[in-house]
Image (cartoon, grey):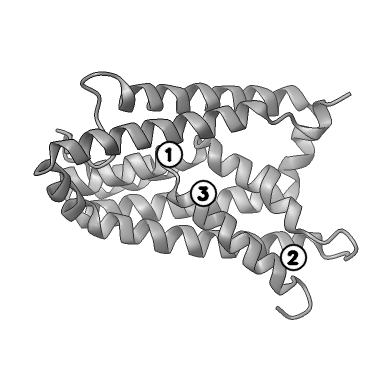
Amino acid sequence: MGGWVSWGAVGGMALAALIMVLTPGPNMIYLVSRSIAQGRIAGLVSLAGTGVGFLLYMTMANLGLAVVFVVVPWLYVGFKAAGVAYLLHLAWKAIRPGGAGVFEARTLARDSAGRLFRMGLITNLLNPKAAVMYLALIPQFIDPHHDNAAVQGFTLGTIQIIVSMIVNALIVLTAGSIAGFLSARPAWTRWQRRITGSLLGLVALLLAREVPQAARP
């Protein structure tokens, strides 16, 4: 990697990004719901919005957003608390009796390409998993012994974006087929809801357990 980032960091970042993108969350739920309700093109347009959201996160994190959260730690705590509450809300919607799973069809109004893009962007910007990725996870792969921390951050962020966009694109393109498969198998649908809700709840609990370094005594 040109001496900037070790291959170990590249592999670790790619694996972490893969695990994060495969864990159900606001991005996956929005992209799948749009793909099923309005078609693959709508899902891909929404995905483009989430991609821009990742770029904004990567840029802000490397230009000092993390410093703001260190100086004013309660902002980070508040942001994470809101994200935990939202993930728990999604978990309850999936697990509760009569709840809906990620790949169950929903009746949604058809949105314009511009609105699809904006909603994909907003959903990602408000996604607590994205915030944790850039403010807590990626810095762990940065080598503090080099002076090029920003270059490392942008490189690792680019790897995360590539992995996330490829996996999400595959999810968008196959969402309709998966939904059709599950609709013909009610028992599978129930298990999908339970697994999705459990994973969302687990992510929420893991986020709730983490305390920003700056907020520790």
In the picture of the structure, the residue carrying the numbered disc 2 is 151
Taking the spot 43% from the left edge, 39% from the top edge, the residue there is 25
Q: Which residue is the site of mark 3? A: 20
Give the number of callouts.
Answer: 3
Local crowd size for mark 2, using a 10 Å CA cut-off: few (<14), some (14–19), many (≥20): some
Residue at 31% from the left image edge and 28% from the top image edge: 94
- Quick one: label 1 or label 3, which is nearer the N terminus? 3
Give the residue type at disc 3: Met
197 to the left or right of 211: left
Q: Quadrant of the N terminus?
A: bottom right
Say which quarter of the image contains residue 93.
top left
Residue 48: which quarter of the image?
bottom left
Say whether residue 8 is visible: yes
Q: Nearer the viewer, residue 22 or 121?
A: 22
- Name the residue located 89 percent from the left edge and 23 percent from the top edge: 217
Q: Are marks 2 and 1 in contact (CB under 8 Å)?
A: no
According to the picture, the residue beneath numbered tag 1 turns out to be 25
Residue type at the position of mark 1? Gly
Cα–Cα gap, marks 1 and 3:
9 Å
Three-letter code, disc 2: Val
> Residue most toward the left?
184
Element class at badge 3: helix
* Disc with the residue nearer the chain's start (2 vs 1): 1
Q: Is residue 66 above or below residue 168?
A: above
Residues at marks 2 and 1, CA–CA distance in whole angstroms:
28 Å
Q: Nearer the viewer, residue 151 or 133?
A: 133
